[in-house]
Image: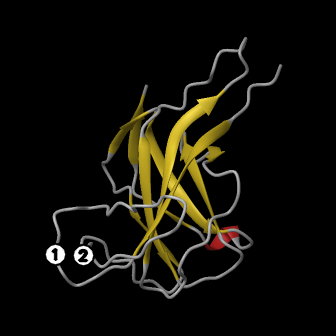
Amino acid sequence: MKIAYALMFSAMLAFVACGDDSSSSSVPESSDSSKPASSNDNANFDCTTDSVKVVAPAKGDEFKVGDTIAVVFGSSLDFGGFGIEYRFDGGEKKIGLLEEAVDGETDGKTCNEVKVVLSVECEEDEECPSIAADDAYIRVYPYSKQAKGSNSGTIKVTE
């Protein structure tokens, strides 16, 4: 049997507009996770870009396999939604974090947030591969123009 390298994704999507007021909350929550929400509650991120910019997770962030990661990005490119990948081992290994592309604001200044769960699905009788890494990162890319994507800072993922 083949080992499935699929990561489960969280259905929780929230879209965050970068505002000018300050807040202690780094990631506003949406009251209805089935519908994107806009909020000016978060001035901690600057998503201004003329292409794609990943602002979270940030360099040095640490996660465990199974954690929910809030991926925050801005974009001015509209090419059929966005894909999100977890890359590790110097970028040589990659795993898609979404089953399908997600939509996002593409005005070049709005922060889009997508929550994904970092976990591996394997066949019942197979050993799951380790996805832990000291040199991992998240890549966000326009779905039909993958070369135009951007990477998060380097993150550490442990078992």
Task: Report the front residue among 70 and 130.
Answer: 70
Residue shown at 42%/38% (left/top)? Answer: 67
Residue at the limit of the structure toward the top, as seen here? 125
Where disc 2 sits, the SS reads: loop
Dividing the picture into quadrants, the one containing residue 141 is bottom right
- Residue drawn where x is 50% and y is 69% of the image: 36
Q: How many numbered dots are placed on residues in this image? A: 2
Identify the amino acid type marked 2.
Ala
Residue 6 in the image: x percent, y percent?
68, 38
Give left or right: position of 102 versus 24. Answer: right
Name the amino acid type tagged 1: Ser
Q: Earlier in the sequence, mark 1 or mark 2?
A: 1
Q: Nearer the viewer, residue 64 or 153?
A: 64
Say above or below: 155 vs 141. Answer: above
- Residue 45 located left or right of residue 124: left
Q: Which mark is residue 22?
A: 1
Q: CA distance from mark 1 to mark 2?
A: 5 Å
**Pointer 1 with pointer 2, Cβ within 8 A:** yes
**Residue lying at 70% horizontally and 57% vertically, measured from the top left:** 100
Q: Which residue is mark 2?
A: 43
